[in-house]
Amino acid sequence: MTVPSHRGPIVIDTGVFGADMVRRSELAERFEPVIAGRPAFISFQTAAELHYGALRRGWGERRVQQLRAKIASVEVVYAGPELVVVYAHLRAECARTGHALSQRDHDADRWIAATAVRLGVPLVSDDGIFADLPGLAVETA
């Protein structure tokens, strides 16, 4: 589901948030109007995925510092009791309806979706896995 853009807070998924860090500038440029000027959150899962990607690709210190600064520019939402319960409910609902997000391969995506659901704000994403999730509004470009 694509929700008309508004100027309230958002959660940004890993692919969109890190696009300009991994040379996917067309994706970053496409989403800039959706993200610009809005209070932004990312899941702890997104921060972990981006740090892992930097390690795996052998980024140098300068690039790692840029990544840290980018992450510091938004609010990182960490797992706590409420987010854990939302995550469990989301997985159960996805399993009940046959949605692919219930599958083990999508554990990381589920944390990101649960973060947006928990905060009650849209998820900004270019990933179709988030389509048709109950309680999740998705903004795309």
Image (cartoon, rainbow, N blue to C red):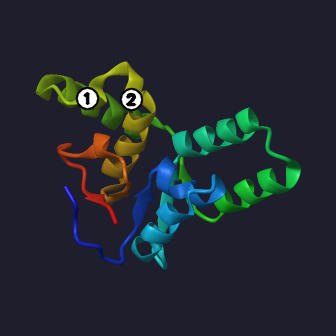
Amino acid tagged 2? His
| Residue type pointed to by label 1 | Ala
Q: What percent of the width, then of the height, locates residue 43? A: 50, 47
- Coordinates of residue 49 in the picture (x, y in percent): 59, 39
Frontmost residue, 79 versus 53: 53
Q: Is residue 141 above or below residue 54?
A: below
Which residue is found at the position 38% from the left and 20% from the top? 104
**Residue at 17% from the left image edge and 45% from the top image edge:** 132
Quadrant of the snapshot with the C terminus = bottom left
Q: Which residue is mark 1?
A: 100
Check contact, mark 1 vs mark 2: CB within 8 A: yes
In the picture provided, is 118 more to the left or to the right than 32? Answer: left
The residue tagged 2 is 106
Q: Is residue 126 visible?
A: yes
> Could you tell me residue 67's position as x and y percent?
71, 55
Q: Quadrant of the N terminus?
A: bottom left
Residue 52: quarter of image: top right
- Which residue appears at 24% of the width and 56% of the height? 137
In front here: 85 or 12? 12
- Asked if residue 78 can be seen in this view, the reply is no
Question: Quadrant of residue 55 in the image?
Answer: top right
